[in-house]
Image: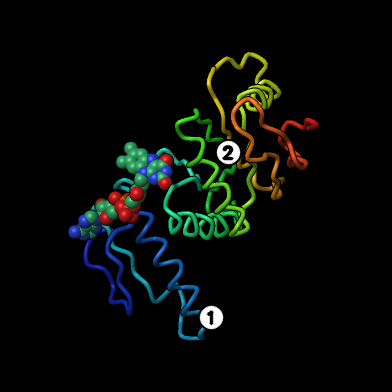
Amino acid sequence: MTGSPAPARYVIIGAGIHGLSTAWHLARELRARGQGGGEDILVLDKRAVGAGASGIACGVIRNNYFQPAMRELMAHSVAVWESDPEAFAYHAVGYMQIAPEAMHSGVAKIFAEQQAIGYPSTLIEGEADCRAYMLDMFDDWQAPGITAILHRCRPTRARSSVISSSSPPDRGSVTSGPCSTCPSRSP
Ligand SMILES: Cc1cc2nc3c(=O)[nH]c(=O)nc-3n(C[C@H](O)[C@H](O)[C@H](O)COP(=O)(O)OP(=O)(O)OC[C@H]3O[C@@H](n4cnc5c(N)ncnc54)[C@H](O)[C@@H]3O)c2cc1C
């Protein structure tokens, strides 16, 4: 809208993801407490909804940050998006972090922390296993020197799985079954 806005009990400045998320959570909280709802909240933007960074972001949602606090925040956020994908225009496709040896231990640490908070993902370790895993999905896969893959499957079909051991590169192994969308191989 343009012009002077109507008075409101709560005013949020900025209609980017943070402003809209704040409004959404506040509306839910007000409703849960029986103290009002979305009609009590006004979001103002100097330009338009999504006029800032939120409107040009790539739209990548990934929970593979190195900071533990970010991982918990992302797990929480993903749960919100997955709670109503249609309303949030959330198109979950999963993601893969495909890493060389220099990043192997960091990726394994992320995986361990994801498991600790119940976030479903799969870790493949070892150059031979990583190559086989990728070739199962892409028969023209070529990248050499990959020794760790962190795979978050398409969430609707995902379940927690551990298919790696702490084997050194080239001796990776599968220690339990992958999720239904992952390539399935025997140890
Ligand atoms: C190119 C690019 C790609 C990105 N890709 C990703 C990605 O794939 N995944 C990811 O998670 N993150 C991504 N990000 C980061 C992400 O987009 C931002 O962290 C996030 O959008 C920030 O949201 P915000 O609400 O804080 O800011 P913004 O989206 O910038 O919203 C701020 C709003 O406030 C308004 N505003 C500012 N000042 C005033 C004022 N004085 N009065 C009224 N309104 C005002 C602006 O018009 C704007 O609409 C990307 C960022 C960029 C730039």
| Image coordinates for residue 15, horizontal then vertical, percent | 33, 57
The residue sitting at 46% across, 80% down in the picture is 30
Q: Nearer the viewer, residue 140 or 148?
A: 148
Q: For the residue labelled by badge 1, is the local secondary structure a helix, a strand or a loop?
A: helix
Q: Which residue is mark 2?
A: 150
Q: Nearer the viewer, residue 41 or 154?
A: 154
Query: Eyeballing the image, is 78 above or below 184?
Result: below
Badge 1 crowding class, 10 Å Cα cut-off, few under 14, some 14 to 19, many 20 or more, is few
Query: Eyeballing the image, is 176 above or below 30?
Result: above
Q: Amino acid at mark 2?
A: Leu
Residue extending farthest right: 186
For residue 152, side relative to residue 8 (left or right): right
Q: Which residue is mark 1?
A: 32
For residue 22, side relative to residue 123 (left or right): left
| Image coordinates for residue 138, horizontal then vertical, percent | 65, 20
| Image coordinates for residue 122, horizontal then vertical, percent | 65, 42
Q: For the residue labelled by badge 2, is the local secondary structure a helix, a strand or a loop?
A: strand
Query: Eyeballing the image, is 71 above or below 121?
Result: below
Q: Quadrant of the C terminus?
A: top right
Which is more foreground, mark 2 or mark 1? 2
Q: Amino acid at mark 1?
A: Ala
| Image coordinates for residue 118, horizontal then vertical, percent | 63, 58
What is the spatial separation of the Cα atoms under label 2 and label 1, in whole angstroms?
Answer: 38 Å
Q: Which mark is first along the chain, 1 or 2?
A: 1
